[in-house]
Amino acid sequence: MEHQLAKTILKIKVTELIAEKYRISISEARDMFYSSDISSLIDDDETGLYGDSPLYVFSLFEQETLKKK
């Protein structure tokens, strides 16, 4: 469970970006984000994704969302 603070902050920032972009509540954005594959990749220390910028992770989330449609 290394880098827990960085992961938490990143998830909060990405959730805020989702809420802003899609004009939904933080709760709805959090549900969308936590059901994505990207969210689980942040928890995996080996990916190093927790060290990337919120905008980059948000772009990955959007790509995943578009692929699912």
Image (cartoon, helix red, strand yellow):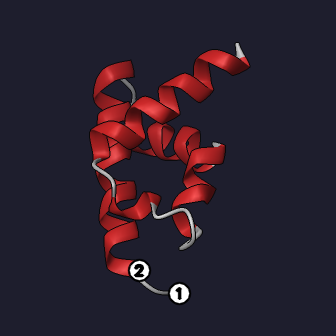
Q: Which residue is pictured at 51% across the width and 34% down the height?
A: 61
The x and y percentages for residue 60 are: 48, 34
Decide if residue 7 is in sight here.
Answer: yes
- Which of the 4 quarters of the picture holds residue 59? top left
The x and y percentages for residue 44 are: 59, 69
Q: Secondary structure at mark 1?
A: loop
Nearest the viewer among 14 and 50 is: 50
- Binning the other alpha carbons within 10 Å of mark 2 as few (below 14), some (14 to 19) or many (20 upward) gives few
Residue hosting label 2: 4
Circles 1 and 2, Cβ within 8 Å, touching? The answer is yes
Marks 1 and 2 sit apart, C-alpha to C-alpha, by 6 Å
Residue hosting label 1: 1
In the rendered image, the quadrant that contains the C terminus is: top right
Q: Which residue is pictured at 58% across the width and 50% down the height?
A: 34
Nearest the viewer among 21 and 1 is: 1
- Which of the 4 quarters of the picture holds residue 6? bottom left
Whether residue 33 sits left or right of residue 36 in the image: it is left
Nearest the viewer among 23 and 56 is: 56
Q: Amino acid at mark 1?
A: Met
- Outermost residue on the bottom side: it is 1
Tell me: residue 48, above or below residue 26.
below
Q: Which residue is pictured at 55% across the width and 62% down the height?
A: 47
Q: Which residue is pictured at 51% across the width and 60% down the height?
A: 42
Q: Secondary structure at mark 2?
A: helix
Tell me: residue 17, above or below residue 21.
below
The x and y percentages for residue 63 are: 54, 24
Q: Amino acid at mark 2?
A: Gln
Whether residue 27 sits left or right of residue 65 in the image: it is left
- Binning the other alpha carbons within 10 Å of mark 1 as few (below 14), some (14 to 19) or many (20 upward) gives few
